[in-house]
Image (tube, rainbow, N blue to C red):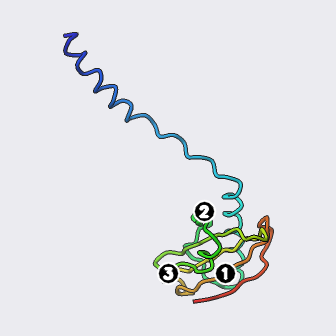
Amino acid sequence: MTRTIARWIPLLAALSAGCAPAPPPAAPTAEEVTATKAASVALTALLNRKFDVQGCDASEARVVQEAEARAGTPQGERCAILVARRSDRTWLVAVRSSLSSASVGAQALVTVLPEAEGVGAIEYTR
């Protein structure tokens, strides 16, 4: 009997290692936290200006380079948010509304102040 169990020990050890709980996700960096806050400030400002932000979630914002944020994203079924840190420490937040929203795929480029304490400017594009 000991021989039979001994043959299975390596397999059981390998299987039990695969059942270990996943490590917790890494804590967001200060830059990522501020980027999410900048996206939230931008969404609030757009909502106050009657830009349809239905389905937009600041926590789903992607941090990208400024050129990519300025270029925006193609129109799609979901709202898309791109956030970029600019050289003057402000944030550029590109919000593309979903095709099902009242703004039908419109895009807003929002300049958010350095520590996400407010909005500097808003540009609208298609």
Q: Residues within 10 Å of mark 3 (few under 14, many from 20)?
A: few
Q: Are marks 3 and 1 in contact (CB under 8 Å)?
A: no
Please indicate whether residue 55 sits to the left or right of residue 115 in the image. Answer: left
Vertical relation: 55 (above or below) 105: above
Q: Residue at x 79, y 67 (%)?
A: 114
Whole-percent x, y for residue 99 in the image: 49, 83
Q: Residue at x 37, y 35 (%)?
A: 18
Three-letter amino acid code at the position of disc 1: Leu
Whole-percent x, y for residue 89 in the image: 77, 68
Of discs 1 and 2, which sits in the foreground? 1
Q: Which residue position holds label 2?
A: 59
Three-letter amino acid code at the position of disc 3: Pro
Vertical relation: 57 (above or below) 108: above
The answer for how far apart the CA atoms under marks 1 and 2 are is 18 Å
Whole-percent x, y for residue 51 in the image: 64, 84
Identify the mark nearer the N-term, 1 or 2.
2
Q: Are marks 1 and 2 in contact (CB under 8 Å)?
A: no
- Residue occupying the far top of the picture: 2
Q: Are marks 3 and 2 in contact (CB under 8 Å)?
A: no
Q: Which mark is residue 109?
A: 1
Q: Residues within 10 Å of mark 1 (few under 14, many from 20)?
A: many
Q: Which residue position holds label 3?
A: 74
